[in-house]
Image: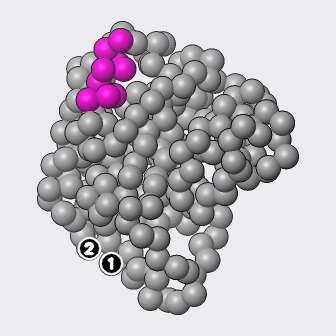
Amino acid sequence: MPTIPTDRRVLLAFGAHPDDIEFGAGGIIACEIRAGTKVHFVVCSEGESATSGTPAQRRQEAMRSASILGATIEFIALGGDSHFERSIESTLTVARAIRRIAPQWVLCPTAKPDQHPDHAVLGSLVRDGARLARYGGLAELRDIPAHAIEQLWYYAVGPEGEPAEATAVWYDLSDSEVVDLWKEAMNAHETQLRTRRYLELQLTRARLLGLRAGVEYAQALFPADPMLVKSLTQLGRGARQF
């Protein structure tokens, strides 16, 4: 498996709501950006159905958070907060974004049921959109070259989004500067932290994984497809420490 030059590494992260990416995968993103990967956020609503915060506030918080991490950001519409549906129109919108950004890797929420419905629907839309982005014959997308990603990775915004049947990859977040940056990015979502202890929840989840793996903090990713390698040296050690 050839090494991708730093200046060509691109990670595209989808979030259903303005804070999903940071809460679900912010530590991983902070690590990747520090390593030279270019990261772009696509946020698919402005949180307009949320109990706390106006769409304008949520948009500003997301932009500030992305800036803290060093990511670029854009917003697209998939029907509005709490109104996501699986449709060919939405799938093509996602596929268009993937073609336009042309990333090696894509992150999105898991498609597991019994979490916020938008998270599950977006997971399935990105999965299908990544497939359609490869097909050069799609009339609706012919204005942008077809693009095949290397891997789709799912993240769980909350514990209820973690798929029990999937084998996770645990990402080591031991660098204290990375964790501090992640905290700062999550704290940018002030309207959401007023009523729920989201930051404490995410740090506790990461600390628990870290303890299990013998590191300070870790976050889980779930590969959409089996990983293909040419050497065992491309794989990390097993996470089990107990």
Q: Is residue 60 magenta?
A: yes
Which is more toward the observer, 240 or 65?
65
Left or right of 131 in this view: 98: left
Whether 120 is drawn above or below 48: the answer is: below
Give the residue number, with chain letter if any, for mark 2: 214
Furthest-front residue in this view: 143
Q: Position of residue 86 (x, y in %)?
A: 73, 30
Q: First in sequence: mark 2 or mark 1?
A: 2
**Colouring convention used in this rendered image of the protein:** one colour
Left or right of 238 in this view: 182: left
Q: Secondary structure at mark 2?
A: loop
Tell me the quarter of the image containing the C terminus.
Answer: bottom left
Q: Is residue 123 visible?
A: no
Left or right of 66 in this view: 106: right
Q: Secondary structure at mark 1?
A: loop
Q: Position of residue 43 (x, y in %)?
A: 47, 30
Q: Residue at x 66, y 31 (%)?
A: 93
Between marks 2 and 1, how big is the CA–CA gap? 6 Å
The 10 Å Cα crowd at callout 2, few under 14, some 14 to 19, many 20 or more, is some
Whether 238 is drawn above or below 86: the answer is: below
CB-based contact (under 8 Å), mark 2 and mark 1: yes
Circle 2: residue type: Gly
Which is more toward the observer, 226 or 131?
131
| Region rendered in magenta | 56-64
Task: Tell me which corner region of the image, top left, top right, bottom left or bottom right, holds residue 19.
Answer: top left
Give the residue number, with chain letter if any, for mark 1: 241
Q: Residue at x 53, y 53 (%)?
A: 103
Whether 97 is drawn above or below 181: the answer is: above
Q: Position of residue 32 (x, y in %)?
A: 34, 58
Which is more toward the observer, 97 or 157?
97
Q: Position of residue 9 (x, y in %)?
A: 44, 61
Q: Is residue 61 magenta?
A: yes
